[in-house]
Image: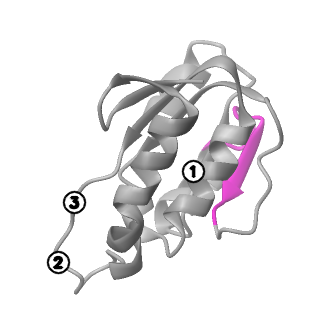
Amino acid sequence: MLVHYLARKGYRAVDLADIPSSTIEFVRKAMSGMLARIITVTGSEDFGTERYAVIVSLECLEHTFEPLLIVQKLVRALRGGGLFVISFPIEDDFSASHIREAQEQRDATFAFLKGSCEEIVPYRLYRK
């Protein structure tokens, strides 16, 4: 887990945000003293403005109802020149925890990123 690696390397200004899950509960119990903040993402949170130098969003947006809104908030929280690393896979199996509404917003989410940031690696890496 990336946050564990960063915390073990001594980084203390690291926040973790994830959808409600057993993973975030494990992190809350095991790593709360190593991280600045642990945020459960519901769509209503405020990540602040120009707070982060790097934001990493891997394999989580497909589990949310409002990925576009969440990415808009994350880009607002990214500092000028900051990096946004993202993995938002295309899903067609909605029987588990993948949300159909997320897939319906996937193209708009990447269009927003491309319009708000420099696209370094399409569908993966952006710079504000």
Classify mark 1: residues with Cα within 10 Å, few (<14), some (14-19) or many (20+): many
Amino acid found under the numbered disc labelled 3 = Ile
Check if mark 1's residue and mark 3's residue have beta carbons within 8 Å: no
Amino acid found under the numbered disc labelled 1 = Val
Is label 2 in a helix, a strand or a loop? loop
Which numbered marker is on residue 71? 1
Q: Quadrant of residue 123?
A: top left
Is label 3 in a helix, a strand or a loop? loop
**Which residue has dot 2 on it?**
93
Q: Quadrant of the C terminus?
A: top right
Looking at the picture, tell me which residue is in the foreground, 12 or 93: 93
Q: Residue at x 51, y 38 (%)?
A: 115
At which x and y percent is residue 120? 37, 19
Relative to residue 125, is residue 9 drawn left or right? right
**Which residue has dot 3 on it?**
90
Relative to residue 66, is residue 91 drawn left or right? left
When the figure is inspected, residue 83 is found, relative to residue 85, above or below; the finding is above
User: Disc 2 and disc 1: Cα gap in Å?
Assistant: 22 Å
Is label 1 in a helix, a strand or a loop? helix
Check if mark 3's residue and mark 2's residue have beta carbons within 8 Å: no
Classify mark 3: residues with Cα within 10 Å, few (<14), some (14-19) or many (20+): few
When the figure is inspected, residue 2 is found, relative to residue 59, above or below; the finding is above
| Residue extent of the magenta highlight | 31-41
At which x and y percent is residue 2? 45, 30
Q: Residue at x 54, y 64 (%)?
A: 19
At which x and y percent is residue 111? 43, 47
User: Which of the marked residues, 1 or 3, is nearer the chain's N terminus?
Assistant: 1
Amino acid found under the numbered disc labelled 2 = Asp
- Asked if the stretch drawn in magenta spans residue 112, the answer is no
When the figure is inspected, residue 11 is found, relative to residue 35, above or below; the finding is above
Of badges 3 and 2, the one in the foreground is 3
